[in-house]
């Protein structure tokens, strides 16, 4: 969980850099409590810290986490191992997310979302737009939790981490931030409405509502950045 929290600290940097853009926090938490060695050995401490840095630089983030913790036990008053631990935690969570990112990037278009509903899938729908946008119009049964308030009241989110969740905003940008956060917090069945409210409105204005039955599988997406 702490690794997930540290990931959230770096989330804005990751997403805003364009990693998840179309052409693709919880507050800071103290480091883990550790049993402190009473007589730190400076040489051993330096060795552990250097090894942690080397592991981080080579992309071995789990090893870097372990070694940084060991260094912190030897010299808890030094910020260096804690700073490295936080960096490694962010990198480990981000690396895990990106390595497992499917081609569709957890997006579901309006047709397949509505077809799922017609076939009995009960989505927990979250509209992450602002209250005035939600009041103007929204998807039926959607719950309005503005993006910046998404984690302020966890009781508003489904109790089960496997509940199907559909996120949407105006054009999908805000919802992408929300999707990354919820996925990293363990919600394993979260989807982004492809194109957001704009695409939903356009599709429903020009197409009949799906009825129960098979729906065509979406075409594979072309390569994208």
Image (cartoon, grey):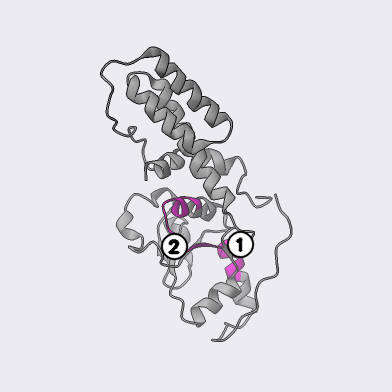
Residue position for label 2: 126
- Which quadrant holds residue 34? top left
Q: State yes or no: discs 1 and 2 in contact (Cβ < 8 Å).
A: no
Q: Residue at x 34, y 32 (%)?
A: 31
Characterize the local packing of mark 2: few (<14), some (14-19) or many (20 or more) Cα atoms within 10 angstroms: many
Question: Of all residues shown, which one is farthest toward the right?
Answer: 222
Q: Position of residue 155 (x, y in %)?
A: 30, 58
How far separated are the C-alphas under marks 1 and 2? 15 Å
Q: How many numbered markers are drawn?
A: 2
Residue 98: in magenta span: no
Percent x, y for residue 217? 65, 75
Kindly identify which residue carries mark 1.
195
- Report the residue at 40% width, 18% height from top: 45
Q: Is residue 207 above or below residue 123?
A: below
Q: Position of residue 12 (x, y in %)?
A: 51, 41
How many C-alpha atoms fall within 10 Å of the one at disc 1: few (<14), some, or many (≥20)? many
Q: Residue furthest top?
A: 42
Q: Is residue 182 above or below residue 16?
A: below
Of labels 1 and 2, earlier in sequence is: 2
Residue 183 belongs to the span the image colors magenta: yes
């Amino acid at each position: 969980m702490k690794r997930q929290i540290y990931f959230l600290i770096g989330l804005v940097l990751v997403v805003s850099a364009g990693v998840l853009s179309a052409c693709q926090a919880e507050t800071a938490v103290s480091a883990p409590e550790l049993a402190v060695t009473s007589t730190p050995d400076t040489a051993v401490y330096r060795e552990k810290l250097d090894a942690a840095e080397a592991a981080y630089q080579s992309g071995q983030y789990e090893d870097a986490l372990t070694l940084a913790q060991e260094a912190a036990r030897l010299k808890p008053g030094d910020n260096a191992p804690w700073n490295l631990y936080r960096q490694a935690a962010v990198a480990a969570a981000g690396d895990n997310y990106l390595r497992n990112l499917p081609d569709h990037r957890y997006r579901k278009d309006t047709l397949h979302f509505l077809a799922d509903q017609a076939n009995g899938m009960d989505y927990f729908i979250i509209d992450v737009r602002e209250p005035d946008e939600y009041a103007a119009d929204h998807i039926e049964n959607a719950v309005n939790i503005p993006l910046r308030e998404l984690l302020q009241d966890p009781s508003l989110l489904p109790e089960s981490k496997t509940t199907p969740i559909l996120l949407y905003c105006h054009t999908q940008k805000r919802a992408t931030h929300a999707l990354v956060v919820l996925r990293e917090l363990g919600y394993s069945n979260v989807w982004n409405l492809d194109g957001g409210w704009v695409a939903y409105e356009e599709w429903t204005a020009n197409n009949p509502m799906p009825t129960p039955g098979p729906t065509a599988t979406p075409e594979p997406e072309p390569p994208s950045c």
